[in-house]
Image (tube, rainbow, N blue to C red):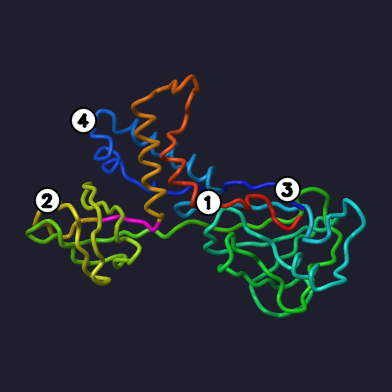
Amino acid sequence: MYAGLTLVTPPAGEPVSIATLKNHARVTVAVDDGMLGGYITAARQHAEDYTNRALLTQTWRLALRSFPGRDYVSTSREWTSLEQYYRWNYIAIPRPPLIAVSAFTYTDTSGTVFNMTQGFSALMGNYLAPDLNFEPARLYLPFSGVWPTTILLPGSAIQITYSAGYPSFSGVVNVDTTGKILTWVSGSVFDPTMAGSFIDVAGQSATVQTVTSGTSLTLQNGIAASQLNQAYTANGVPHSIKQAILIHAAHLYQNRESYLVDSDFTETPLAARSLLDQYRNFHAIQEND
């Protein structure tokens, strides 16, 4: 039933900043900032492909040839048991974490386009119910529902457009006289997931020690002290993934081509892959084919 997966809109930013990478790689000059930004993007794309995840918010389109249980390759399968029903009553959405489905369409042989929307009615072909507790997330049929019986146009007749990725945060903060206490002024309030990860304030990168509340947090390393109304950015990408991106991006900066280790050419540092392994999602292709 799987036909293809297309990136419609890439993320607007990156999980780590150039300032953070420069701290990590001990780069003190600005002349290579553009190059460093490119290496961050390349490392992020590798991390997404390796883990089969979406990191920051992006839009994807999943194309399917048929609904679950109706691949039309052999005889059309019928739900003759609960086991079959539970196998074919959902569609798994690649590249978690899923944020929202913006469109679900299918086209019949006459070219007529139909829509499925979120809801809990069992009316045939009308509704589906997202479940974000699975990874990857699943689009379920409502109880006792069945997939549309319309004869589909050959090819990628089913198109599911959705957004995915970890949350991003941005706003304005005040910095106290120690350079370690941030007080929220406007924008996104501080999120607990920021603790232990990076935050950028006025172009300076720092690590969050604790999030005291939605309006106050403490940094591990201080930044320029006593600043009012400074812009900040952060995101909920797991810290290990950010560290893997930093390691990989620094490696790309320091090694402009493949390098030799024990008679083997190595492209990606082992440390980066090890950090990413725990986040690998192996359901990259529709799992109920």
Residue holding disc 2: 224
Q: CA distance from mark 4 to mark 1?
A: 33 Å
The C terminus lies in quadrant:
bottom right
Residue type, label 4: Val
Magenta residues: mostly which secondary structure?
A: strand
Residue type, label 3: Ala
Query: What secondary structure is found at the residue carrying circle 1?
Result: loop
Q: CA distance from mark 2 to mark 3?
A: 52 Å
Identify the residue at horizontal 75%, vertical 64% (top origin).
Answer: 114
Give the number of the mark in front: 2 or 1: 1
Disc sitting over residue 29 in the figure:
4
Query: What secondary structure is found at the residue carrying circle 3?
Result: strand
Residue type, label 2: Ala
Verify whether residue 224 appears in magenta: no
Segment colored magenta: 232-236
Query: What secondary structure is found at the residue carrying circle 2?
Result: loop
90 w.r.t. 274: above or below: below
The extreme front residue here reads 262
Q: CA distance from mark 4 to mark 2?
A: 19 Å
Query: Of label 4 and label 2, which has the lower sequence position?
Result: 4
Q: Count neighbours of disc 1 (C-alpha within 10 A) and say few if under 14, some if 14 to 19, many if 20 or more.
A: many
Residue type, label 1: Arg
Q: Left or right? Give the position of 153 relative to 26.
A: right
Residue holding disc 1: 53
Give the number of the mark in front: 1 or 3: 1
Q: Count neighbours of disc 3 (C-alpha within 10 A) and say few if under 14, some if 14 to 19, many if 20 or more.
A: some
Disc sitting over residue 234 in the figure:
none
250 w.r.t. 177: above or below: above
Q: CA distance from mark 3 to mark 4?
A: 47 Å
Residue holding disc 3: 3
Identify the residue at horizontal 87%, vertical 54% (top origin).
Answer: 72
Q: Count neighbours of disc 4 (C-alpha within 10 A) and say few if under 14, some if 14 to 19, many if 20 or more.
A: few
